[in-house]
Amino acid sequence: MKPTYKTTIFACFVGYIVQAIVNNFAPLLFITFQNTYFIPLSQITLLVTVNFAVQLTVDLLSTLFVDKIGYRTSIVIAQGFSAAGLVLLTFLPEVMPPFFGILTAVIIYAIGGGIIEVLISPIMESCPTDNKEKAMSLLHSFYCWGHVGVVLISTAFFALCGIENWRVLAYVWALVPVINGFIFLKTPIAPLIADGEKGMTLRELFCSKAFWLLAVMMVCSGASEQAVSQWASAFAEIGLGISKTAGDLAGPLTFAVLMGVSRAIYGKYGDKLNLDKFMKASAVLCVFAYLLASLSPIPVLSLIGCAVCGFSVGIMWPGTFSRAAATLRTGGTAMFALLALAGDLGCSGGPTLVGFVSDAVGGNMKAGILAATLFPLIMALCLFIGKKKSK
C-alpha cells in the first residue's frame, strides 16, 4: 500500500512518542543511577541540563543544515541518534566512569531529540489538514501519550522483572525510533512554504518584536512543563516519601495524562475555543498548581498540584507554535528551529533551577518547585502583553 499524508501524520505522532521516550525514560532511573553508581543529586541534575542543552544547541545549528539536506534526511537521522543513545545507555556506564557513560548516551539521544523537536511541527504544519491549530495540539498530545506509555510500561516492567533489568527495556524502547525511521524514508513530505514565497531570514526574525515575545513564551512553556515533569518521580519518592512504583504512577503518569487530556481537548474542540483565553486560563491555573505542589503540607495535595500542573501546561507549547505560525506566516524552518531552541532553553532551565535550589536547601524539592513558579507567572504576563499589542 502506497504511503499517503495520513502515513506522514502517523509518523509525526510517533515522532513525538520518540521524543517522550528520550526525555522521560532516564528520569525514571534517576534514583537507580544514584544508588547503583553513587552519583550525587547535583550530577543527576546535570543529566537533565545536558539533555536539553544539547537539544537547544541542535535547534540552533539546524537552521544551517536542515534546508540544505532536506526534511526527510534530517528526520531519519534524528530517529537513528535517538535509538543509538538508548542502546548506548545500557552499556557505556559499565565501560566508562559511570556518570560520563550515562552522560555520553544522553548527549547522543539528545541530538536526535533536538532534530525531532525542530522538524516534527513544520512537517505536520505542511500536511494538508482542515484546522492547523487543532492538528498541532493533537500532534503535541502524542508527546503526552508517549510519556504515559513510557511511565506505565516502564513501571509495569520494573515491578514484574525488577528494576535491575532496566537495560532490556531500553532496547525495547530503541526499536520505536528504528521503525519510525523506516516509515519516514517512504512517506510523502510537503514543503513548508509554498512555491513563489520566501521564508523569513534570521535577521528579519530577530528584528520582529512578535518573534521575541513568542520566544519568551516558548522558554516559559518548556520550563513550566519540565520543571515538574522531570522531577515528578523523584519529588514523589524523596520529597513526599512514597514508594518507587507509587511515585512513578502518582507523579509523572498523572502529569502526562492530564497534559495529554488538555491537548486532546483543544485538538478536538479547537474550532470552538478561543486559543488566547484558553492559554491565559492555563497559565493562571499553572501558577496555582505550582503553589499547591510546593506549599501544601499534605502529600496528597502536593501530588494533586503536580497533576493539575500537567493539565495547565498542556496548551502552552503547541499554542505558542500555533500563534507563531499564524503571526509569522513565512517564518519557515528558521522560525520553528529558533522557537524550539527557546523551548528547549526553558526545558533545560526549569529542571535545573529546581535541582539547584533543592540542593542548596539540603535536598528540599518543594523549595525548588516553588522557585520555578516564576515561569508560569512570566507566561501569563506575556499573554497579557501579546493581547494588548494585538488590540
Image (cartoon, rainbow, N blue to C red):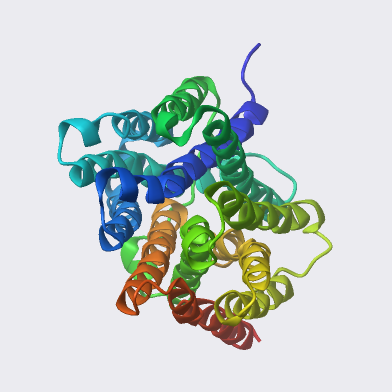
Q: Is residue 289 visible?
A: yes
Q: Determine the residue located farthest toward the top in the rendered image.
A: 1
Image x and y of residue 293, in percent? 59, 74
Q: Quadrant of the N terminus?
A: top right
128 vs 87: above or below: below
Image x and y of residue 149, in percent? 61, 39
Nearer to the camera, 273 or 5: 273
Q: Is residue 192 visible?
A: no
Residue at image location 50% in from the left, 27% down from the top: 176
61 vs 183: above or below: below
Left or right of residue 115, residue 169 in this image: right
Image x and y of residue 357, in percent? 36, 76
Residue at image location 27% in from the left, 42% down from the top: 102
Nearer to the camera, 5 or 59: 59
Nearer to the camera, 161 or 188: 161
Q: Quadrant of the C terminus?
A: bottom right
62 vs 292: above or below: above
Left or right of residue 248, residue 137 in this image: right
Q: Quadrant of residue 187?
A: top right
Image x and y of residue 7, in percent? 63, 27
Left or right of residue 362, residue 174 in this image: right
Q: Quadrant of residue 5?
A: top right
